[in-house]
Image (cartoon, helix red, strand yellow):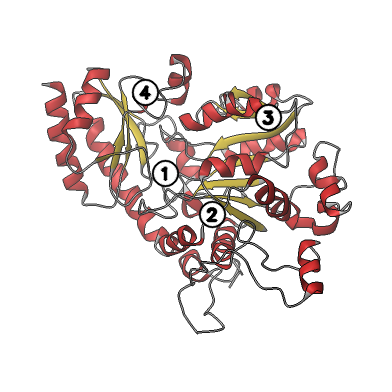
């Protein structure tokens, strides 16, 4: 089942990419725990290696369990294809890998997960790439940052940690005018709350570790390609528009059209970078996605209840939940994210850094972990953990000031979550 135009989201999240096993009739997608696959004959093997036939060669490249997950996520996002990998950070490198080269840059939002800021500002320099960080609330500034060496624009639909919402369409218009792809990290929103491809994004990345899996068991990542970008419109993307020496001069875009990026990511990206998702992790994520819409509805409902309570607390300086009418992003959220803005937001304590540390230590129901998107409610003090490597200016731009904590609201009873925060804030500010 792949027809996203016929079936509703709730149906697709259960059935897309999944068919009864032809050999056994097993209804749940099996875990194909195998390294390699037997070829029918020498000709079959040669066709697979030449990309003349689709099939399974080696599980670093393709695996039936992982393929089911790729198809499901691609269908939910409205993409032409997808490739899964070992983590969200791996997905970001996989997304950039076919686009970039030495001397090239990516224009990125200032409001990104701290690990992404570090990856873009430090690690990618080792590839000869660079990043320019711009406030995505100012499309004109994004346009001004793009130069002849820019190969992509990168942002988050709902930014981690602050829950800020991006007007994807306005940024997509800027990227389109420059003839470069827009990459949107849709981890915090999920395809249930946001469809970046419909809003003009070329590529969508996920840390499937988070809401898609939803149970805090495995790590994973995914890159979804819209299949709509013309990689041959200019000479900026030679990996896709020019002959590939490793495949006897095959031109990916010419030969594979809308699936060019996806096939390149498997045939070159996974082959050479080796950022493989294991089949057991794919299985856990497939099961998690089956309840995605149900969980996201509760995440959204609980987040607004908890944020509304926090907003009235005398010890709280501010709350960043875009689902609140007091949020400067409320109007944008209602327009761009009508189903809600997820379960992720931050709040600041008037008593500062030390009070945040005491708060984290005083909570009972909230788990203090470096994760988000779990069924359980989670908390972290970003300035001392996930955003610790950033400068004070970068922390402020990302919404991770020293007096701020990040909440990932789970699916528990909201009254219990509020009671836990109430006693912890009292202990932290006594």
Rendered residue at 36%/28% (across/down): 385
Quick one: label 1 or label 3, which is nearer the N terminus? 3
- Quadrant containing the N terminus is bottom right
Q: Position of residue 111 (x, y in %)?
A: 50, 29
Name the secondary structure under disc 4: helix
On the rendered structure, is 115 left or right of 238? left
Q: CA distance from mark 4 to mark 1?
A: 23 Å
Q: Position of residue 46 (x, y in %)?
A: 80, 67
Residue 428, by quadrant, is top left
Q: Which residue is mark 4?
A: 383
Is the residue marked by circle 2 packed among few (<14), some (14-19), or many (20+) residues within 10 Å?
many
Label disc, if present, on residue 7 of the rendered structure:
none
Rendered residue at 45%/37% (across/down): 331
Q: Nearer the viewer, mark 1 or mark 3?
A: 3
Q: Which residue is mark 3?
A: 127
Quick one: label 3 or label 4, which is nearer the N terminus? 3
Q: Which residue is mark 2?
A: 277
Label disc, if present, on residue 341 of the rendered structure:
1
Q: Nearer the viewer, mark 4 or mark 1?
A: 4
Rendered residue at 53%/28% (across/down): 117
Q: Nearer the viewer, mark 2 or mark 1?
A: 2
Q: Nearer the viewer, residue 380 or 32?
A: 32
Residue 303, by quadrant, is top left
Q: Is residue 190 visible?
A: yes
Q: CA distance from mark 2 to mark 1?
A: 28 Å
Q: CA distance from mark 3 to mark 4?
A: 28 Å
């Amino acid at each position: 089942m792949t027809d996203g135009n016929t079936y509703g989201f709730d149906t697709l999240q259960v059935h897309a990419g999944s068919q009864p096993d032809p050999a056994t009739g097993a209804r749940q997608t099996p875990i194909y725990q195998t390294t390699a696959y037997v070829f029918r004959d020498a000709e079959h093997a040669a066709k697979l290696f030449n990309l003349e036939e689709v099939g399974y060669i080696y599980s670093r490249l393709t695996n039936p369990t992982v393929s089911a997950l790729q198809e499901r996520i691609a269908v939910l996002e409205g993409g032409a294809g997808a490739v899964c990998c070992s983590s969200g950070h791996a997905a970001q490198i996989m997304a950039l890998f076919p686009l970039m080269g030495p001397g090239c840059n990516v224009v990125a939002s200032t409001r990104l997960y701290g690990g992404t800021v570090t990856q873009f500002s430090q690690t990618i320099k080792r590839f000869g790439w660079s990043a320019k960080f711009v406030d995505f609330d100012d499309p004109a500034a994004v346009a001004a940052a793009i130069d002849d060496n820019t190969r992509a624009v990168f942002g988050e639909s709902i930014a981690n940690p602050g829950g800020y919402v991006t007007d994807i369409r306005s940024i997509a218009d800027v990227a389109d005018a420059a003839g470069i792809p827009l990459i949107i990290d849709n981890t915090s929103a999920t395809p249930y709350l946001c469809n970046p491809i419909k809003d003009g994004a070329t590529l969508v990345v996920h840390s499937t570790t988070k809401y898609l899996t939803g149970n805090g068991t495995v790590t994973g990542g995914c890159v979804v390609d819209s299949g709509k970008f013309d990689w041959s419109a200019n000479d900026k993307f030679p990996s896709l528009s020019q002959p590939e020496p490793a495949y006897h001069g095959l031109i990916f875009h010419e030969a594979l059209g809308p699936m060019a990026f996806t096939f390149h990511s498997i045939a070159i990206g996974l082959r050479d970078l080796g950022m493989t998702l294991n089949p057991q992790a794919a299985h856990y994520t497939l099961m998690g996605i089956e309840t995605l819409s149900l969980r996201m509805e509760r995440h959204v409902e609980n987040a607004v209840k908890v944020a509304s309570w926090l907003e009235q607390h005398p010890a709280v300086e501010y709350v960043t939940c875009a689902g609140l009418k007091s949020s400067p992003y409320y109007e944008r959220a209602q327009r761009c994210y009508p189903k809600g803005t997820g379960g992720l937001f931050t709040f600041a304590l008037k008593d500062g850094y030390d009070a945040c540390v005491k708060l984290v230590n005083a909570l009972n129901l909230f788990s203090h972990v470096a994760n988000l998107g779990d069924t359980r409610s989670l908390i972290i003090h970003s300035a001392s953990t996930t955003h610790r490597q950033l400068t004070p200016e970068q922390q402020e731009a990302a919404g991770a000031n020293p007096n701020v904590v990040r909440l990932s609201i789970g699916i528990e009873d909201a009254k219990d979550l509020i009671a836990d925060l109430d006693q912890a804030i009292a202990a932290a500010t006594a």
